[in-house]
Image (spheres, rainbow, N blue to C red):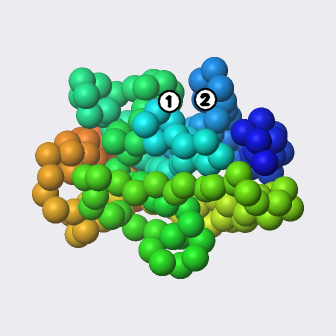
Amino acid sequence: MTTQEFDQLFDAEVAKRLAPLGFRPRGKNGKTLDLLEGITLVSLLRLGGRLMLPGSAVWTLCFRHAFLRELNELKIVKGVTGLFTEHYPFKFTPSELVEGRKELRYQSQLNWDYDRFTYEDLPAAQVQGQLRTLADFIRERFVPWARSITPAAAKEQLRQFGSGRWDEKIWIEDYDRRIQTHAKDAAPNGRPRSAS
């Protein structure tokens, strides 16, 4: 299978199947897919550069809250431009999740893992099936999980499963700031105060 044939299958089996949820292609090549919904950002990052090998694709499945600062200039980014794997606290290899080898929770990894899908010698039907499985997992399990993670729950996972690294400390600061800001805006019953 050629790269062009794989990209066509990826578009048909992953991008088009995730589009109804709100996933949009990022950048010129559109190989990374992002779902930005309120404060929730889910990304299937297609990695390139030194990771690329002929006849294969490399990706990582990521989740972050949109109010977190990126880690280079410590600024909040509007949208998804410039967000790469290191800017996401929650990074997963989809194959490990699909196969049940890892659980959906924060994993403290400075050097993150990624999936390499070698399609070059596979029949189109097998590639199509694996891409469909990936899209189904993202749609049926990963997105609902990401939507359910509140800032307080994400912060707790960073504290419970983190190692106290510098990036985790920045994210915890951001979560604390968000939680404190929104606590001031909430009435005693937890609902937002009326605008009156």
Query: What is the number of the mark on residue 26?
Result: 2
**Foreground pick, 44 / 177:** 44
Percent of width and height locating residue 75: 29, 25
- Mark 2–mark 1 CB contact (< 8 Å): yes
- Whichever of labels 2 and 1 marks the residue nearer the N terminus, that label is 2
- Above or below 58: residue 122: below
Q: CA distance from mark 2 to mark 1?
A: 8 Å
Does dot 2 land on a helix, a strand or a loop?
strand
Please tell me how crowded label 1 is: few (under 14), some (14-19), or many (20+) other residues with Cα within 10 Å. Answer: some
The reply to whether residue 39 is in sight is: no
Picture layout, residue 189 above or below residue 177? below
**Residue name at image x 65 percent, y 46 percent:** 55
How crowded pointer 2 is (Cα within 10 Å; few <14, some 14-19, many 20+) is rated as some
The residue wearing badge 1 is 80
Near-viewer residue (88 or 122): 122
Foreground of the two, 78 or 125: 125
Residue at horizontal 21 percent and vertical 45 percent from the top: 167
Q: Looking at the image, how many numbered discs can be counted on the residues? A: 2
Q: Is residue 14 visible?
A: yes
Q: Residue at x 24, y 24 (%)?
A: 73
- At label 2, the amino acid type is Arg
